[in-house]
Each structure stands twice: as C-alpha cells, then as structure tokens.
C-alpha cells in the first residue's frame, strides 16, 4: 500500500513537471482539474487510464515520505503549498481589479437610471444606461479569461463577484422592464452580458437575487410616476409584480439570502397595491382595468 | 392562442426549451408555429406580451425551481454523507488514541482497517453523491467531513510511521473510489490544511496520554512533529482563501504545542511524580543515570 502511494506521489509530481504549460504551483489545480472539469469533457477517461497505467511504471526514486527524517519532504510539500496559495492569491487580486471596474460601470448605469424617478423620458434614460452594457460585457469577458486559467474553480472565487453581479442583473432587468414591460429571463441576462453556461455563466441564484433587487425599485418608481401624472403606471406595475411574485412562489427556497430577498418582495407588492388603490378610488386610473382588477382580486 | 401553446402537443419541457430558444432568436426569427404565441410588432402587442409573458415567466420559473430543487437535494445528500464520514473518522481517531507500548500493533491494525472502511464506504458514498461535479460549489457541505477524514488519516499515519501523510498520497488513495468517467473527488489544499490543524489537537491529547503512561520519548517525538507542522503552517496560512477559521485554529495549535512542551518539561524536571513505576535501571527511563540519593 505504501509503495503504491509512493508511486502515485512521484507520478503526480513528475507528471506535473512534464506538462510544459503548468508551473509548479498548479499541483492542486492539476489534481483538482481531475475533479472540477465539467463532466461533459470526455478527455478525463484516457487521462485517468494513463494515470493508472503509470502506477506500475514509475520508478521509486529518491527520497520520499517514508524516509526516516520528515524534514525534506515536509518542507517540500509546504513549499509547494505556499507557491500554490500565492498563485491563487494573485488570481484573486486580478479578479478583484476587474470586479472593481464592474462596480464602477454599474454605478454609472445606476446613476443614469435614477433619472426615471424624475420623469425624464424613458428612451433617453435608457440610452445613457445602455452605454454601460458594452463596458460590462467586456469586463465580464475579462473576468472569464482570468478564471479560464484555473478551470472548474468558478465557485471557488464566485463570492468575489457575487454581489456585483446581482446588482448588474437587477439594473438590466429594470431597464428591460422599462423598455418592454416584461421580465428579463436568465438566459437573456446571460446573453446581454456575453456569458454562457459552459464557460463563465450567470449563476441562477445570483440572477434570482438580482430580480428581487429590481422589485425593490418598483414601489418608488410607481409613486413617482403617479406624482408626475402617469396614472396608468400602477396598474401595469401591479400586474407585473403580481405575476413575478406568483412565479417566485413556485420556488422551494431554503432559509438563505435569496429567501430573505423574496420575503422582501411581498412588501414591495403591498406598497404597489396601496398606490394602485389610492389612484383607483379617486377615479384617476384610466379604463381598461379588467386585467388590473383581476390582479387585485386575485391577491389574498 | 395561449391555450394552444399550452396544449398537450407540447411537452412542458419542450415548451420551455422552445421559449428559451425563442428568446435567443429575438423577435425576428421565430419558428413559424410560434408566431401566434409570441408578441409581434402590432397594437395588440401589449396584451399578447402580457399573456405570453405570463406563461413564459411561469415556465422559466418552473425550470429555475427544478434547478434549485436538484441543487438543494444534492446538497442535503452530500451533507448527510459528510456527516457519516465525520462520525466514522472520529471513531478511527478514538481507536488510535488507545495506542500504547503494549498494544501498538493490534491497535494500528484495527485502525488501518477502520480507516480503509471509512474510505471505501463513507467517502465512497460522498463521491457518489457529488457525481463528479460541483466540487467547489458544494465545498461547504462536505468540507467538515473531509477535514475529519484528513485528521484521522494523518493521525494514523503518524502513529504508524512518524511521518506526515502528504496531500498527494491521500488523494491517490481516493482515486480508485471514483467512476473513471467522472472527475474524481480530490481533497483540496484548504481542506487538507484545516484537517492538519485539527490533527495537532489530537496529537496534543496523545502526547499527554503517552506521558502519563511513561512513554516520554514518544511524547517528545510528537512534540517535534507538531512544532514542525506549526512552523510550516505559519508561512502558508496567511495566504489561504478564507483565513479567519484557520487563524483561530493556529492560535489553538500554538496552545497545543505549548501544552506538549510544558508536559515534556514537567516530566524532565519532576519525573518521579509522573512515573513512579519506572526505576532508574530501566534503559528507557530518563532517570537512568540519576543516583538513588537524588531521587
């Protein structure tokens, strides 16, 4: 058993050095690459059989973990670890740099979108905000490139761009709604950012949280629209938010952040209902209410 | 029209995939049969948009629901498997703790068997539940179990050979557990280091136990070993992904090292209180050359 371990140890080490592309540091990524490549990649099969074949052919050379003194191999192992961790630390710094840029592009987009609350015409507002989408697309592809260096570790570093991405999704969804009155779907959001599932995708939970953030904007928008004289807005927003809330109820959420945000959506819906009610009883709402009324009556 | 969309002609899944395909195609290139359902550039666009939006939202969300259900169920199963790994690894550790000069061989033999059983049964189940994917995504679900396993395996290896079980070695032993067509579960560096930190706690307990049994040299070799690990870790820990957990473990580790060192010191200085049965004639006794007058 010991000798098999020894062989494996030397095998992985020498395999590591033979790979012209790898630096010493990627010991863990190479090993994790076994574990983290998408299972659709079939090249692991021949890879693993070479691994197993080499078990018997690799010579037991030099000092190894069974040597009476632990110093050389202990230090060697930890030296390797240090180098690997320094590498992943550097990677993280590069990710942070890109994420900071994403954050600043997002802020610009958000600032231009704030004009909708001041009744600036929507197309104008959208035009300015849309200008940032291309910048974001570039930044996400930069991020994807960085991550491509350690395949399969998307979720290792995911926390570094999670909240920024959620904000981006919420802004994109809001803009999409302002334009079309419909909900931006997960696949559409992915497309807008130039992401795809196989390479660097949009996490579904990030998307859902982003949608919840978007719904948080609705009450404020509706209030300001009514103040500015658009009495039809509440009906549309109410229908949209009702549908959205109903759709969210289909999800089985566990007690995490997403669940909390979804619970918050309830209050957004309530607030929009109140605005709609205020407008309706004063007879300010225009006709064509049948859909809206159904929405009201359908609500418990 | 909407009703037609929902008709039995379309399976729900095919409707979803059609809708997602349609969203990729945007309004311009729709499959001919879809024309009736998707909004066209017309005055009734709004009503139609709302109706089909309604159905497409529901369908999209039902696919999100499926995705989340599958993920959460998988996570649950992984957590359960990880708990079993933890429990059984702890048993191995307790087994190894029973070691003494007299029963060394049998204790280690049983421990080796038990460790192999943990690997072949519990870890194997963990591998099965992970299905070769989501290793980093679900790491929090199985990390405790893996850490405990690392602790048990390194503890056993040290008691057997006095050396540290390397990450490569432990991963090599896990390779056969995975189906060749899937990515194998390989313990990552972070879990290994976390497990190592817990190992030092067990070693401290072992050292104290061995001292009270009179096996001072064993305790001293444990002391050297733990010092080495601590020293090596100090350079590596600050670079880890989330250092918070590890930092607290390092503090505990230093305390363990100091406890062992103090115990060894006490034995040296006040040995007679600890080892009344070992006389100065016993070759392994540190009291060997102390004359009776000084005892």
Image (cartoon, grey):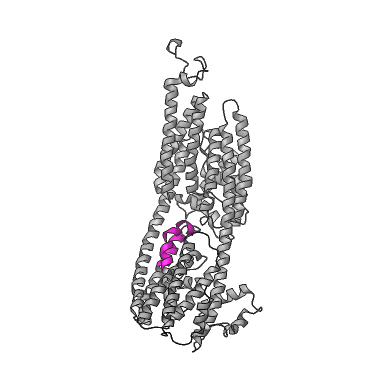
Residue A173 location, quadrant:
bottom left
Q: Nearer the viewer, residue B121 or A92?
A: B121
Residue B38 location, quadrant:
bottom right
Quadrant containing the N terminus of chain B in the rendered view: bottom right
Magenta segment: A139-167
Looking at the image, residue B285 lies above or below residue B147 = above
Q: Nearer the viewer, residue A209 or A165?
A: A209
Q: Residue furthest bottom?
A: B43
Q: Residue furthest top?
A: B293
Q: What percent of the width, then of the height, locates residue A179?
A: 43, 80
Q: Residue furthest right?
A: B8
Q: Residue at x 60, y 33 (%)?
A: B108
Residue B152 location, quadrant:
top right
The total number of labels drawn is 0
Q: Residue at x 58, y 66 (%)?
A: B66
For residue A144: magenta? Answer: yes
Q: What percent of the width, then of the height, locates residue A230?
A: 39, 83
Looking at the image, residue B217 lies above or below residue B82 = above
Q: What percent of the width, then of the height, locates residue A165?
A: 43, 65
Judged left or right of residue B72, residue A163 is left
Quadrant containing the C terminus of chain B in the rendered view: top left
Q: What percent of the width, then of the height, locates residue B280?
A: 49, 15
Q: Residue furthest front?
A: A281
For residue A289: magenta? Answer: no
Question: Does the rendering let one see residue B94?
Answer: yes
Q: Is most of the magenta stretch helix, strand or loop?
A: helix
Q: Nearer the viewer, residue A11 or B247?
A: B247
Question: Does the rendering let one see residue A47?
Answer: no
């Amino acid at each position: 058993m010991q000798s098999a371990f020894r062989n494996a140890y030397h095998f992985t080490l020498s395999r590591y050095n033979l790979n012209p592309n790898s630096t010493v540091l990627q010991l863990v990524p190479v090993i994790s690459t076994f574990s983290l490549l998408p299972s659709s990649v079939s090249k692991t099969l021949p890879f693993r059989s070479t691994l197993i074949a080499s078990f018997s052919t690799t010579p037991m050379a030099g000092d190894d973990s069974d040597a009476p003194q632990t110093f050389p191999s202990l230090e060697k192992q930890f030296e390797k670890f240090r180098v690997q961790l320094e590498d992943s630390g550097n990677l993280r710094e590069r990710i942070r740099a890109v994420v900071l840029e994403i954050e600043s592009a997002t802020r610009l987009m958000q600032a231009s979108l704030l004009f909708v609350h001041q009744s600036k015409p929507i197309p104008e507002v959208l035009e300015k905000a849309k200008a940032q989408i291309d910048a974001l697309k570039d930044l996400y592809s930069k991020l994807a490139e960085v991550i491509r260096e350690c395949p399969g570790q998307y979720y290792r570093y995911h926390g570094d761009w999670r909240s920024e991405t959620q904000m981006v999704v919420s802004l994109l969804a809001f803009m999409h709604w302002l334009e079309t009155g419909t909900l931006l779907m997960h696949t559409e959001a992915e497309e807008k950012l130039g992401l795809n599932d196989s390479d660097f995708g949009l996490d579904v939970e990030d998307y859902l949280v982003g949608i919840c953030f978007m719904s948080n904007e609705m009450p404020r928008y509706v209030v300001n629209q009514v103040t500015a004289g658009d009495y039809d807005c509440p009906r549309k927003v109410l229908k949209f938010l009702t549908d959205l809330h109903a759709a969210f109820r289909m999800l089985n959420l566990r007690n995490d952040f997403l669940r909390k945000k979804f619970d918050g959506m309830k209050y957004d819906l309530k607030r929009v209902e109140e605005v709609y009610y205020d407008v309706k009883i004063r007879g300010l709402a225009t006709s064509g209410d049948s859909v809206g009324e159904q929405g009201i009556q359908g609500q418990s | 029209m909407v009703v037609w969309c929902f008709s039995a002609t379309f399976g729900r899944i095919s409707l979803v995939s059609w809708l997602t395909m349609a969203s990729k195609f945007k309004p311009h290139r729709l499959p001919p049969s879809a024309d009736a359902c998707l909004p066209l550039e017309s005055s009734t666009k709004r009503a139609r948009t709302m109706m089909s939006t309604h159905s497409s939202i529901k369908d999209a969300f039902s696919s999100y629901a499926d995705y989340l259900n599958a993920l959460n169920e998988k996570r649950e199963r992984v957590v359960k498997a990880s708990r079993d790994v933890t429990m059984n690894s702890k048993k191995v550790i307790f087994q190894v703790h029973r070691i003494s000069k007299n029963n060394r061989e049998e204790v280690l033999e049983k421990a080796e068997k038990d460790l192999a059983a943990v690997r072949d049964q519990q870890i194997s189940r963990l591998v099965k539940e992970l299905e070769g994917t989501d290793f980093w995504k679900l790491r929090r679900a199985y990390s405790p179990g893996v850490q405990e396993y690392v602790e048990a395996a390194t503890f056993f290896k040290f008691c057997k050979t006095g050396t540290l079980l390397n990450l490569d070695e432990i991963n090599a032993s896990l390779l056969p557990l995975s189906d060749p067509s899937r990515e194998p579960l390989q313990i990552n560096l972070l879990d290994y280091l976390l497990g190592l930190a817990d190992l030092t706690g067990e070693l401290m307990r072992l050292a104290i136990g061995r001292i009270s049994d009179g096996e001072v040299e064993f305790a001293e070799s444990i002391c050297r070993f733990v010092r080495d690990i601590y020293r090596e870790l100090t350079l590596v820990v600050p670079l880890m992904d989330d250092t918070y957990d590890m930092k607290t473990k390092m503090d505990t580790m230093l305390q363990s090292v100091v406890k062992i060192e103090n115990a060894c010191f006490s034995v040296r200085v006040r040995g007679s209180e600890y080892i009344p049965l070992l006389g100065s004639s016993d070759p392994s006794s540190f009291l060997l050359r102390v004359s009776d007058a000084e005892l």
